[in-house]
Each structure stands twice: as C-alpha cells, then as structure tokens.
Image (cartoon, rainbow, N blue to C red):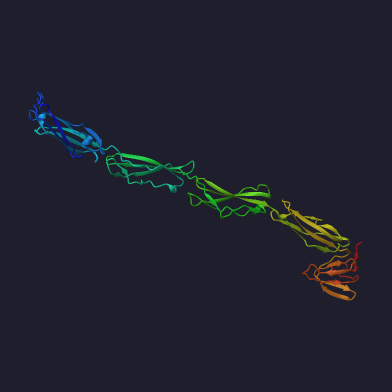
C-alpha cells in the first residue's frame, strides 16, 4: 500500500468573521476497518469538538481567537473539510450582559456535516472607575471647594462615562485648633448594570493664624500716671478668615512708682478661634515738675498800735501737676509777729517725687509806734494849722519814716491814692478814734 501524505491548508479569518475554513487534502486510501461512520458516506468519518463554555467580562472580545475554536477529525474519505460558526445572541438583564450560543459546524467535501454548540456568557460585574479627589486641609471656610466632581465622569470597563455624584456631611466643628471642622465628601458612580463604587475625601478646616495688628503706637514718656492718653483708635487688625476683628486696649498697673515707673498698655486682637496677637506700648512715668506755690504779695505796713512790730497773716497755696492741691510750708508761718524791718517769708511745697517749688513774701514793718488805727470812711476831716481841709478817702493807711514823719495813703478803696505830707505833729480826726491823743513816736 502506498503511504498516505497529509497536507493541511488553513486560512485564518478576520476577527468576528464567524467563519473558519480548514481544507484537508489527503490521498484516497481505503478507510481502516472498523472505523465509525457518522455521515452519509460509508467511507467518511467526521467528528467535531467545541471549545468549553465560558463566562467573560463585557470588556473582553468574543472572537474565537479569545474564546477558542472548535476542532474536528475527518477520515481521508471525507475530502476537504470546512469549519464555520454562527452566533445566536440572547440579551441579558442589562445592556452590557448577553448570552451567545455559538454553533460550530464542520462540513466535508463529501457532504458530511458535524456540529456542536459553545455557550459564551457575557457579563458586567465591574464598576466604573474614577480618580478620587485628594484630602485637603484649609485655614478658612472660604477655602473649602464645592462638593462637585471636576472630571468628565467615571470610565466604565464596557465603554462610556458615567456621572459621579457628590454628597457632603460635616462633624459640626468650629474650624479651630482642638475643634476642627471636617467635611466628608462621598463620591459615588454606577453603570447600567448597577455596578457602583464610591470613595471619600476629607476637607479639614483649622484656623490657627492669629490676626495682624497695624498702627501700634511708639513708647511714650508722661509726667503723671493719671495723665495716660486715651487708647489710640488708629490701631487696627486684619484676619485671614474674618474681615472684621475688634482691637481691645488695656493698661497694666504702675510698676516702679510715680517717679520713674512704667505702665504697659496692651493692644490685643482675637479672632473667633481664639488666635490672639498683641502689641505693647510702654508709658514711662517721669514727674520732674515742681509744684507751683502761690502766696500773698509782699506786705508793707505799720507796727501794731503800741507795738514795735506787727502780727501779719497771709495766704499761700500750691498746685502740683500730678498731685493737685498741696499743703504749703511757710517760715515764719502766717500769723507770726514780725519785728521792725523787712523779713523774708519762705513758702515751699514738695511733691512725692521730691520736686520742690517755692515762693517768698517780703514783710516790711515800719519803725514807728502809733497810737491809733486807720479807719475807712467816705469823708475824713483832716485838721492842720492852716484850717480845715476836706479830703475824700475810702481807706487810709498811715506810714512813717525813720523820723516818725507821717503820710496818709489810700491803699484799699478803688485804687484811689491821695497822700498829704506833713512836717510836724498834727491833730487828725478819725472816726472811731480819739483825735485828741493821736500821735506816733519812734520805736526804741
């Protein structure tokens, strides 16, 4: 017997062509004894075997290159064999799901046919995918982005984009250190087959930035602790999260006393989260001004009647820039008896810082002893050796020189002055005095 020669010519189909052709050209030799005959030709034995059933995702190809190709067996008597397939598609529960009944058929040149069915189940079990936004940390509520997805949507494995929906919740915090405000954004998407996926991102709000103070005034030296100026309205504050921040002003105690001590004034701004900024202005208290002492003017007068001297009273006061009215110490004090001549009265006042102010009064007592008192009257009759002279006086002061010569002067009434000089003793009529005994003599 001549040895058989097998020659196979295989043509690969294009994807999804649904047709595969195998041509088997063999020498015509008798079929071996006892072979099964599955077709109309008693001499051709043709069998076929399908690929196994399978379940695949919708993003995979159903082409036989991916799902497998049927195989057949043919005896030499069958001649050329053609292998083909056809699909019957049954829709699934969602648009991307389906069942394919793929029938494979082997047909020989001799007219013999063998077939089998492969079941391919196409399913969609994968959710669309998208990039979840990153977590954020911001200082202010104004920096929190809206709860929206910025991309074009979620890409599905079966093709197409599906919208991403965002929902937001928060923890009720105040956005401060120790009490952050945390937003939780949940992004969710689903495809036509109900496959869904979600992710979360958090946005944490914590304001830990203090306000900024501007316009803080420079340090200043003042005379008195009680003379602190008002708080400077030019000090303002700005904040990263709050447009309106109030500035408070408070003064500390006097440290070091009123003579070279200091007072610290603090300007402070605090935002709703308790972040605080402050600046301090130092007032140095330096009282270097003495009290101002005021006294009566210089005093010039006669001796008291029958005395070689006079008891003199005068007024004195002192006003300090910090302490106000003060006690004045005068030496000799008011009400003292002053001898003939001029006595210097020294009046002084010293404040708490040792600043001393003073003033002097010159008290002059004439050296004649007189035996009458001046009186005040509208008309005083003055008699001299020439007769009667009427002189209008409202007040009268008698003055004597060292020779006890006398003059009379109006010093108290309306500024009117009329002086009459005499060169010898005269009788003077005073209301309320004995004109017969009026005389002056030098003090011993």
Extreme residue in the right direction: 444
Along the line of sight, the residue nearer the viewer: 208 or 443: 208
* 442 lies left or right of 394: right
Along the line of sight, the residue nearer the viewer: 19 or 23: 23
Q: Is residue 401 above or below residue 247?
A: below
Q: Can the viewer see residue 258 in this picture?
A: no
Report the number of discs: 0
Extreme residue in the top direction: 34
* 332 lies left or right of 352: right
Q: Residue at x 36, y 40 (%)?
A: 199
Q: Is residue 101 above or below residue 368?
A: above
* 135 lies left or right of 112: right
Q: Position of residue 273 (x, y in %)?
A: 50, 45
Residue 61 appears in which quarter of the rendering? top left
Quarter holding the C terminus is bottom right
Q: Position of residue 370 (x, y in %)?
A: 88, 64
Residue 312 appears in which quarter of the rendering? bottom right
* 284 lies left or right of 80: right
Residue 54 appears in which quarter of the rendering? top left
Q: Position of residue 425 (x, y in %)?
A: 91, 70
Extreme residue in the bottom direction: 386
Q: Position of residue 158 (x, y in %)?
A: 27, 41
Q: Can the viewer see residue 275 in this picture?
A: yes
Quarter holding the N terminus is top left
């Amino acid at each position: 017997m001549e040895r058989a020669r097998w020659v196979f010519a295989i043509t690969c189909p294009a994807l999804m062509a649904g047709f595969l052709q195998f041509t088997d050209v063999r020498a015509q030799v008798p079929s071996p004894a006892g072979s099964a005959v599955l077709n109309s030709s008693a001499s051709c034995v043709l069998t076929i075997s399908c690929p196994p059933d399978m379940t695949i995702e919708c993003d995979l190809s159903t082409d036989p290159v991916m799902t497998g190709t049927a195989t057949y067996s043919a005896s030499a008597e069958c001649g050329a064999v053609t292998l083909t397939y056809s699909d019957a598609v049954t829709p699934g529960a969602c648009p991307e799901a389906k069942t394919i009944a793929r029938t494979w058929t082997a047909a020989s040149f001799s007219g013999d046919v063998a077939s089998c069915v492969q079941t391919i189940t196409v399913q969609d079990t994968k959710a669309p995918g998208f990039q979840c936004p990153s977590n954020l940390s911001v200082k202010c509520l104004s920096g929190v982005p809206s709860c929206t997805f910025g991309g074009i949507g979620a890409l599905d494995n079966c093709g197409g984009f599906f919208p991403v929906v965002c929902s937001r919740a928060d923890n009720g915090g105040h956005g401060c250190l120790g009490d952050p405000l945390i937003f939780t954004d949940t992004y969710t998407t689903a495809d036509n087959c109900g496959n869904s996926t979600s992710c979360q991102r958090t946005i944490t709000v914590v304001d830990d930035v203090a306000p900024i103070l501007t316009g803080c005034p420079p340090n200043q030296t003042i005379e008195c602790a009680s003379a602190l100026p008002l708080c400077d309205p030019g000090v303002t504050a700005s904040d990263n999260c709050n447009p309106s921040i109030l500035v408070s002003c408070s003064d500390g105690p006097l440290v070091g006393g009123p003579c070279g001590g200091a007072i610290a004034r603090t300007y402070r701004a605090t935002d709703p989260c308790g972040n605080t900024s402050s600046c301090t202005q130092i007032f140095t208290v330096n009282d270097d001004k003495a009290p101002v002492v005021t006294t009566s003017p210089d005093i010039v007068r006669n001796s008291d009647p029958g005395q070689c001297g006079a008891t003199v009273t005068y007024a004195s006061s002192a006003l300090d820039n910090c302490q106000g009215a003060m006690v004045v110490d005068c030496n000799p004090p008011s009400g003292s008896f002053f001898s003939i001549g001029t006595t210097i009265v020294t009046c002084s006042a010293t404040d708490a810082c040792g600043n001393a102010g003073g003033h002097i009064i010159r008290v002059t007592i004439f050296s004649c002893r007189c035996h009458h008192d001046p009186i005040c009257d509208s008309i005083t009759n003055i008699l001299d050796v020439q007769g009667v002279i009427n002189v209008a006086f409202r007040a009268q002061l008698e003055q004597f020189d060292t020779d006890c010569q006398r003059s009379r002067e109006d010093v108290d009434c309306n500024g009117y002055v009329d002086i009459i000089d005499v060169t010898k003793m005269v009788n003077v009529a005073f209301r309320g005095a004995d004109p017969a005994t009026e005389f002056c003599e030098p003090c011993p």
